[in-house]
Structure formats: C-alpha cells, structure tokens
Image: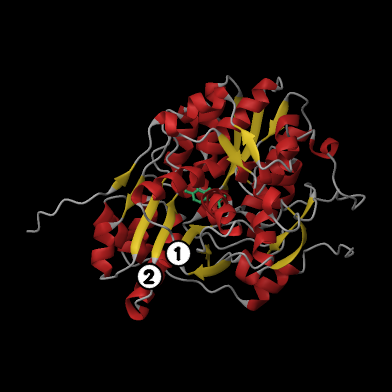
Amino acid sequence: MDDTVRRHKYTLDEDEMPTTWYNLVADLPTPPPPALHPGTLQPAGPEDFAPLFPMDLIMQEVTQDRYVEIPGGVLDVYRQWRPSPLFRAHRLEEALGTPARIYYKYEGVSPAGSHKPNTAVPQAYYNKKAGVKKLTTETGAGQWGTALSFAAALYGLECEVWQVGSSYDSKPYRRLMIEAFGGTVHRSPSNLTAAGRKFLEDPANFSGSLGIAISEAVEVAASDPDTRYALGSVLNHVLLHQTIIGEEALLQMAKAGDTPTHIVGCTGGGSNFGGLSFPFLREKLAGRISPRIIAAEPASCPSLTHGVYAYDFGDSAGMTPLMKMHTLGHDFIPDPIHAGGLRYHGMSPLISHVYELGMMEAQAIPQTECFSAAVQFARTEGIVPAPEPTHALAVAIREALKAKETGEETVILTALCGHGHFDLAAYDDYLNGRMVDEEVSEARFAAGLSTIPPVPVG
Ligand SMILES: *Cc1c(COP(=O)(O)O)cnc(C)c1O
C-alpha cells in the first residue's frame, strides 16, 4: 500500500465566486454573423425574438459588453452549489501511466446533476422579472428539462417540457425528476402541436430529435402572450451564463499553480464547452496562456467535423430565425445514441464562428470509446459520468496517452459537466456487450445537408 496523501480538490469560498459573466464577442477580431429573419432574410432584430424571450435575455444575446453583472437574485441561487469543485485526476493519470496532469471541473454537484442550472436559473429569473407566467422547452437527455423545472419552481413559474421520444422511453427517471420539481413532460413528437402532428405522419420521426422538440416548444410559446420559450444551449446568452464555469476554473487552476495546455469539452450545442473554454480563450487572445482548445463531439452527430458552415434553422420545422452555424441540416435525425444531449443537428453560432477563425479544434468520437473512457474514469475517480462528457474524457485520454509517447508537457483541463446516475441503462448496454458503433452513411449525411435552405451570400 502507498500511503502518500496528495492534493485532489481545488475549491473556492462562496465569496470568491466571480460576480460577472464573460462575453467572448467583445474580444474577437470579427463578430459572428447575425441571425436572419426567415422571411425577409434581413438581420433579425430584438422584436423578432420578443415572442420567445424576455428583453433582458435578448439584450444579452446581442451585447458587445465584455462583462455582464450576475444579478444578486441569481448569485444567491448559484451559491447553493457554486463554486463547483475542480479535481486533479491523480488516480486516472496513474492508471494511464501518463506524465500528463489531468484536471476536471465537476458540474454534477448542481441540483439537476449537470451544468444546465447555470443558465436555467438566470433564464427563469429574467422571465419572472418580465412578468412571464410559463416557460416551454425541449429536453434531449432530460438534463435541461430537469434544470429548467427546478429553476421555474424557485421563481414560481410553470414549466412545460417536450422530451425527445427516444429519451422519454429510455430515461423515465429524468421525466420523474422534472415532475418532482413541478414541471409537465410530453413525449415528442406529440399530438399537442401542429409541428408534432406533422412529424408523427412519418414513422421515421418516432424516436424524435432535439430539432423536433424545439419546434413544438417554440410553437406553444409563440402562441401565448404569457408564455416564453427557454433554450438550454446554442444561443449567445446561454454560453454567456455558462462562463461562470471557466471563470471559476481560472481561479482554481491558479490555486493549483498549473496552466492548461489542453482544454477539452463535449459539444452538443456548445454551452458547457464554451462556458469552460471562453474565459481561457480570453487569456489566450491576450497572450498570457496558449492552450489548445478541443471540442469532443459524437461520431453519429458530428456537426463541427462533418457539417457545413451555413445559415440553417435551429429547429426541424423551420420556425426559428436562421443562424449561421455548423450544421448537419435541420432535418438530420441522429441515431438514438445514449448521449442524448449531444443529438443536435447544429452548433452554437458563436462556437462555429470561433472554429472558423481557427481558434479551436474538434474530434468526433464513437460511443464505445466514450464508455470505455467512462468506466476507466469511474473506477479511478469514483464518479459515474453522464454519457455526454464521456466524449471529452475520451479525448482527454487520447491526449494523455499521446503525452506518454511524445513526453511533451501536457496539462489537460476538462469539464465533467454532469453525472450519469439517471443514465445507467447506457452503462447496462455497454457492460453487457450490447453497445455498437453505427456508422452514419454518406447518403444520410447528404440527405440532411440537402435540407439546408439556400441563403444568398452577402
Ligand atoms: C445538455 C448537456 C450537454 C450538451 O449541451 P452543451 O450545450 O453542448 O453543453 C452535455 N452534457 C450534459 C451533461 C448535458 O446535460
């Protein structure tokens, strides 16, 4: 037995928690292209978003300010679980036999078990302030629905959630968690909306997708003046709220006396990845550090590595403004992989822009490699990760093993953005040999890309 006692955890006191969110747009050489009104193809103005979001959030969506104050009423809720811990993965490093140092910022300590409450809470706060009564949303793996239901309960708002069909069927505990917080859940596609009824006409849509569920939630919000819609990823204001992760991690890495050479995060719509990496990107742009910044996406829904950079709809029915983003086409329905939170056809326009500027990289990972990383992580670090961040762990392990070969100084920082306590069916599949890597055929990719609307360049 080795009785060496090491430093594992880098924490901050409540009053060391940052009190501003960081807006990367202020530091980019060029701003990301604007969203377009789907009818006129002119840049969408605040009034185009007003049926869906309260004005405070619309203003955060387009702000050029470098920092945005976190309201006291939000800080007060954040402090229930924030600052979240940063861990050094000593035992994983040893198991890999790598000289690399691996750190992970753990967001599974939140009430929902993921990073999602970091934006659910301010979104509910600003909606309440604007007099809204009810929020609608979609949920992929159930994490966002859980987070929004929790946040809505705190501010006395109703919450109605369309859960992607495949996830609704395989994750009953997520649905029950949403209901325990007071939310209502529908299986999507549902017959409650015109969009849902249209998609149900084709049996191929039965497993649902984030794009379809968004269409349903948007339709309901747009038709009721007391209801607004809340999105758990993709948009600028969501990434803004998530930067609390990276701002804390910067302080914690300083406490650890270490500087990351690699920052790795999984990307569905890009919010936990942007939240962790953007404050570090600010430091990189200022010339103070120089980490590689790497997005880990699923091989079955590879919007960065296999999508095109084009204007496309955020939902499947084509109701949202057009956003310039990496997209597989708004009709693309990914295989029902276990990482439901990563099954989105598009990528955050801001992350897509940063990717186009060459400021970050991306790798696509098949799910068996992810779960192999997941059990290795669980057996050394004692946390069973959600299926989504196992993509980031897989990339972290790839890079740590590379360091073993090259001997290059490697310090990896990753976001462990959620625990997998409600995802054990996925572990059942993996541990009992039922998990397979299905390749997406070129024909399916081509069919998805063909649904991207033709938008004149200019
Ligand atoms: C929702 C979710 C994701 C995907 O969303 P991003 O916006 O890309 O972060 C990833 N991991 C977990 C745990 C999630 O809940």
Q: Secondary structure at mark 1?
A: loop
Residue at 41 percent of width and 32 percent of height: 81
Residue at 60 percent of width and 56 percent of height: 286
Q: Which of the two residues, 349 or 254, is positioned nearer the viewer here?
A: 254
The amino acid type found where label 2 is placed reads Glu
Mark 1 or mark 2, earlier in chain: 1
Judge whether 161 appears above or below 28 on screen: above
Q: Is residue 355 left or right of residue 42?
A: left
Image spot of residue 247 (x, y percent): 50, 44
The amino acid type found where label 1 is placed reads Thr
Image spot of residue 88 (x, y percent): 31, 53
Q: Circle 1 sits on which residue?
A: 261
Which residue ends up furthest to the right in the rendered image?
40
Q: What whole-number distance in Å separates the C-alpha atoms at marks 1 and 2? A: 8 Å
10 Å crowding of disc 1: few (<14), some (14-19), many (20+): some
Q: Is residue 23 left or right of residue 166?
A: right
Q: Are marks 1 and 2 in contact (CB under 8 Å)?
A: yes
Can residue 10 be seen? yes
- In which quadrant is the N terminus drawn? bottom left
Q: Secondary structure at mark 2?
A: loop
Question: In the image, which disc is placed on residue 409?
Answer: 2
Judge whether 381 appears above or below 183 on screen: below
